[in-house]
Image (tube, rainbow, N blue to C red):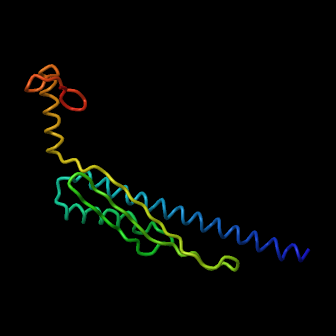
Amino acid sequence: MTLEAAVIIPMILITTILIFWTGVLLYDRAAVRSAASAAVLRGSERAELSNEELADLMKEVAGSWLNGRLVLMDDPQVEVSVEYESIRTGITGSVEVPALPVFGSAVWDVHASAEAMRLRESQIVRTIRRIDRVLEEGGKTEEGKEETEYGEAP
């Protein structure tokens, strides 16, 4: 009885601890992904801001989403890239798993990124006006050429 207890109970205990830490890692990873998505979504809604203002807004949104939600990740790094037509955000961090007698300690990296188109209101209005003009002319452009989904037909 003692030999089984000396082998089986530690294996069950280690397996339970690993399952717990895997759940914590998955939770932190989901929180980081949702923060990256929320930052990009808010940035795409406010596309008329300057690049610097938009980057600051996205970092603020990601930070507010992560504040108080992470279990084991300390100080995640938020990277924001704002270009003319697209915006991106990436969040990286690490979770340190405590030492187990069999495996030792480990560091698990967590990374999430999100990307969205930066659609400015002026671009949307111009596109809608162009579509309205083409529809009013019966599918013809100014030169009398037919309009297709890929542009003007030859």
91 above or below 40? below
Q: Position of residue 56 (x, y in %)?
A: 24, 66
52 above or below 1? above
Quick one: quadrant of the C terminus? top left
130 above or below 67? above
- Judged left or right of residue 133, residue 55 is right
Quadrant in which residue 114 is drawn: bottom left
Q: Which residue is at a point 58% across and 63% down the rendered structure image?
A: 23
- Outermost residue toward the right in this view: 1
Q: Which residue is at a point 59% across and 65% down the rendered structure image?
A: 22
Q: Position of residue 17 (x, y in %)?
A: 66, 70
- Outermost residue toward the front in this view: 154
Number of disc labels:
0
Q: Position of residue 15 (x, y in %)?
A: 70, 68
Q: Nearer the viewer, residue 105 or 26?
A: 105
- Judged left or right of residue 39, residue 97 is right
Quick one: quadrant of the N terminus? bottom right
- Judged left or right of residue 67, residue 98 is right
Q: Which residue is at a point 14% across and 26% down the rendered structure image?
A: 134
Quadrant in which residue 26 is drawn: bottom right
Q: Nearer the viewer, residue 80 or 143?
A: 143
Q: Position of residue 106 (x, y in %)?
A: 58, 76
Quadrant in which residue 132 is drawn: top left
Q: Which residue is at a point 29% across and 55% down the rendered structure image?
A: 42
- Outermost residue toward the left in this view: 142
77 above or below 39? below
